[in-house]
Amino acid sequence: MQRKTWGFVGAVSLQLFLLLLIVVPRWSILVHGKTVVLETLPYDPYDIFRGYYMDLRYRISDPDNLPEKTDFKAERKYYVILSPDGNGIWQPKTVSAELPKALKPDEAVIGGYYRYGWLDYGINRYYLPESRRHHVEELFRRSEKPVLVEIKVKDNGAAAVTQIIIDGKRFKY
């Protein structure tokens, strides 16, 4: 009987440990990260939802919108240093294949992999509850301004979405 109890405790502990491996990195970004607001790129509003999430593209994902011409290599990680403009939207300042050692107080860094002609920062999906999905989709379609996304970024370039902003209305993640 004792052996079965230890086996059960071990199995439950392993499952909890694996669950924590999934949750703790995102929690760490949300707690310790710097808040950054990014502008999305316009795209066909009829194809924004696939299931229960929005597919987001960021202006800083397009290499043509970055300040330097970089010879990007597929599947390699790059770091974009951001700073806020006069409107509070963070813009790219420089691009590097190396994580910067130090940042100024008004700077943040986001890391992404170059894939299929875009930088993928791992924050391209915004999940919504089904009860709010249609309302947000309608606001998105009618918005004449760019949709903004608030994210948190850590000094290592890791990022997590916290909310989406459409015409001043905020939708928490």
Image (cartoon, helix red, strand yellow):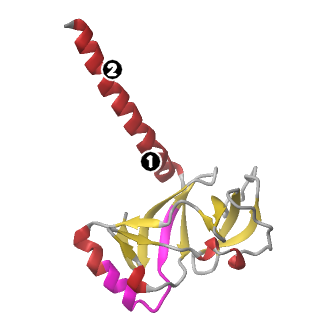
How far apart are the two marked residues, 2 and 1, measured between alpha carbons? 25 Å
Q: Earlier in the sequence, mark 2 or mark 1?
A: 2
The answer to whether one can see residue 167 in this image is no
Q: Is residue 67 above or below residue 121?
A: below
Residue 101 percent coordinates (x, y): 76, 49
Q: Is residue 99 visible?
A: yes
As drawn, the label of residue 10 is: 2
Q: Position of residue 149 (x, y in %)?
A: 48, 71
Q: Would residue 141 be found to the left or right of residue 37 on screen?
A: left
Magenta-drawn stretch contains 143: yes
Q: Which mark is residue 27?
A: 1
Quarter of the figure with residue 11: top left
Q: Where in the figure is residue 139, as x and y percent of width and height?
A: 34, 85
Percent across and percent down for residue 68 are: 79, 73
Compare residues 63 and 87 and report the one nearer the observer. 63
State the image quarter where residue 19 is shown: top left
Name the residue rendered at 77%, 60% in the picture. Answer: 96
52 on left or right of 144: left
At 33% from the left and 20% from the top, the residue drawn is 10
**Residue at the spot x=41%, y=89% of the render?**
143
Label 2 element class: helix
Q: Residues within 10 Å of mark 1 (few under 14, many from 20)?
A: few
Number of callouts: 2
